[in-house]
Amino acid sequence: MKKVLFIAVAVIAFCSFSALPGEKKIPAVTMKTLDGGKISSSEFSNDGKPMVINFWATWCAPCKKELDNIAEVYSTWQKETGVKIIAVSIDDARSSGRVASTVTAKGWEFEVYIDENSDFKRALGVNNPPSTFLVDGNGNIVYEHTGYAEGDEDELYEKIKELTKK
C-alpha cells in the first residue's frame, strides 16, 4: 500500500512540475471562421515565429481599443519580428453576427475567429477579456496578460522582440 501511495505521489509531482512556465501549449479547440467555416486552434502556426492570441468581444470597449492600437503598428511588428496576431472573439451566438462587421469596419488585418461556445476561452483559463497570450515559435505560451491600459501593446511588443532575439 505504501508503495502504491508513493508511486501516486511521485506521478502527481512529476506531472505538476512538467507543466513549467513556457511549456504550456495551445489546446486544440474548434472555432468558427468569419465566413462560417470551422478551424481548430491546433492549426495555428507561424513558421517558427511568434504569435499573439488575443481574446476580445464586440461589447468590450477596452478590447477594441487594444486591437485598434495593435492594428496601427501591426505592419511594423510583422516586418521587424514576423509576429502573427490572432484575435479570438468570445461573442456568443446572440452577438457573434456583429464580429465580421466590426472587423471590417475597424480594418483589422489579423486572423479573426469566433469562440461562440467559449471552449477555447475555458481551455486557456480566460476569465475576462481582453486577455492576451504570446506564443513562441515552438507553440509554447510564454506570456499572458489580462486587461488593457494604454501602452500595454508596447510591453507586448518588447516581449515579442525578446523572443525573436533568441
Image (cartoon, helix red, strand yellow):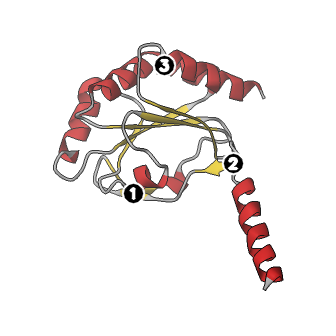
Report crowding for label 1: few under 14, some 14 to 19, many 20 or more residues within 10 A (C-alpha). Answer: some
Q: The disc labelled 1 sits on which kind of residue?
A: Asp
Residue corresponding to mark 3: 152
**Mark 2 or mark 3: which comes first in sequence?**
2
- Residue 6 on image: x %, y %: 80, 74
Q: Nearer the viewer, residue 131 or 70?
A: 131
Please give left or right for residue 112 compared with residue 17 in the image: left
Name the residue that disc number 1 marks. Answer: 119
Callout 2 environment at 10 Å: few (<14), some (14 to 19), or many (20+)? some
Type of amino acid under label 3? Asp
Q: Residue at x 40, y 29 (%)?
A: 109
The quadrant where residue 70 appears:
top left
Identity of the residue drawn at 36% across and 39% down = 128
Residue extending farthest to the bottom is 1
Residue 90 lies left or right of residue 8; in this view the side is left
Question: Do the residues under discs 3 and 1 have CB atoms within 8 angstroms?
Answer: no
Q: Is residue 107 visible?
A: no
| Quadrant containing the C terminus in the rendered view | top right
Which of marks 1 and 3 precedes in the sequence? 1
In the rendered image, the residue lying farthest to the right is: 3
Mark 3 and mark 1: Cα distance apart in space: 26 Å
Question: Which residue position is annotated with label 2?
Answer: 23
Vertical placement of 12 versus 3: above or below? Answer: above
In the rendered image, which quarter contains the N terminus?
A: bottom right
| Mark 2 vs 1: CB contact within 8 A | no
Q: Is residue 112 left or right of residue 10?
A: left
Q: Judging from the image, what secondary structure is the residue with disc 1 in?
A: helix
User: Can residue 74 be seen at all in this image of the molecule?
Assistant: yes
- Please provide percent x and percent y for residue 19: 69, 53
Q: Residue at x 54, y 56 (%)?
A: 27
The structure residue drawn at horizontal position 63% and vertical position 49%, both measured from the top left corner, is: 24
